[in-house]
Amino acid sequence: MITKKQLSFIDRNKKRDKAEIEQLQKDGWRVGVVWECSITGKGRAVKIRDVSEEISFWG
């Protein structure tokens, strides 16, 4: 079960991340979020390659 303290921590992180992403975008950066869990485990190399290929098409 998640505690109020944990919820507060998560909420603060989400707000911080949102503000940082917005600032990067204002500064002209394109921002993509890659969750660690989406590129680890079995087939890690293929997952990382797929993400890298997807990002390369942003141009």
Image (spheres, rainbow, N blue to C red):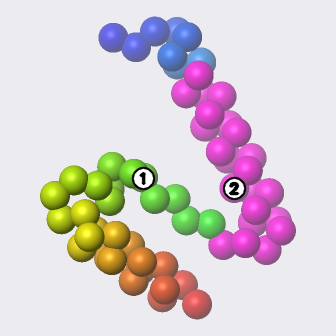
- Above or below — where is 54 with respect to 45? below
7 on left or right of 22:
left
Dominant SS type (magenta): helix
- From the top left corner, tell me how far across and down residue 18 is, in percent: 67, 47
Q: Amino acid at mark 1?
A: Trp
Q: Amino acid at mark 2?
A: Ile
Give whichever of discs 1 and 2 has the lower sequence position: 2
Badge number at residue 35 = 1
Q: Which residues are magenta?
A: 9-30
Badge number at residue 21 = 2
Badge number at residue 2 = none
Q: Is residue 40 magenta?
A: no
Furthest toward the front, the residue is 45
Give me the residue at 22% from left, 53% from top: 41
Label 2 secondary element? helix
Crowd band around label 1 with a 10 angstrom C-alpha radius: few (<14), some (14–19), many (20+) = few
